[in-house]
Amino acid sequence: MKKAKKAVAAAKIPRQVQKHLSQKPFKSFYRMEPLPATFTLISILGMIITTVFTVSGRIELSWGVAFDLVFALMFIASMMSITPRFAGYD
């Protein structure tokens, strides 16, 4: 019974897709560990505070842009670390 179900399921998948499914899963060159929530929180608060201080004139524009860039990169890194992993793609 199980073989019949697999055969029916395999028949519904186009041949091009079957070819790709039969290949070995892609091995990643690096492993990404999830970053802590405090890292994300610090990046968001840092961007907000730096932007407010730059607009109000308490921080020079060049320093404000530099700090905003650092906090934006921190935020992007924290978002990349929470992306879902797919089975077989370690």
Image: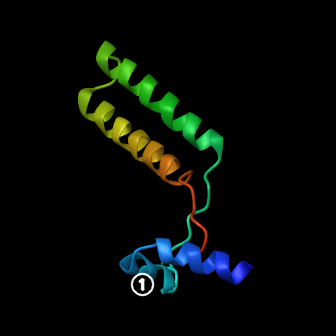
- Name which quarter of the figure residue 39 lies in: top right
Residue furthest to the right in view is: 1
Number of numbered discs visible in the structure rendering: 1
Instruction: Give the residue displayed 32% in from the left and 39% down from the top.
Output: 66
Q: Is residue 80 above or below residue 66?
A: below
- Point out the residue furthest to the left here: 62
| Picture residue at 38% right of the left edge, 19% below the top | 53
Query: 14 or 51, which is in the foreground?
Result: 14
Q: Is residue 90 visible?
A: no
Q: Is residue 17 visible?
A: yes
Q: Quadrant of the N terminus?
A: bottom right
Colour style of the rendered protein structure: rainbow
Q: Amino acid at mark 1?
A: Lys
Between residues 65 and 3, which one lies in front from this camera angle? 3
> Which corner quadrant of the image does residue 54 belong to?
top left
Asked if residue 87 is positioned above or below residue 44 in the image, the reply reads below
Q: Position of residue 20 (x, y in %)?
A: 43, 80
Quick one: 37 or 70, which is closer to the camera?
A: 37
Residue visible at 39% across and 80% down? Answer: 15
Near mark 1 (Cα within 10 A), the count class, few <14, some 14-19 or many ≥20, is few
Q: Between 33 and 26, which is closer to the camera in this rendering?
A: 26
Residue holding disc 1: 19
In this rendering, the answer to whether 11 lies above or below 81 is below
Percent across and percent down for residue 14 are 40, 74
Q: In the figure, is residue 52 to the left or right of 79?
A: left
Pinpoint residue 10: horizontal percent, then vertical percent. Answer: 53, 77
Relative placement, left or right, of 30 versus 20 is right
Name the element at disc 1: helix
Image coords of residue 62 (percent x, y): 25, 34
Quadrant including the C terminus: bottom right
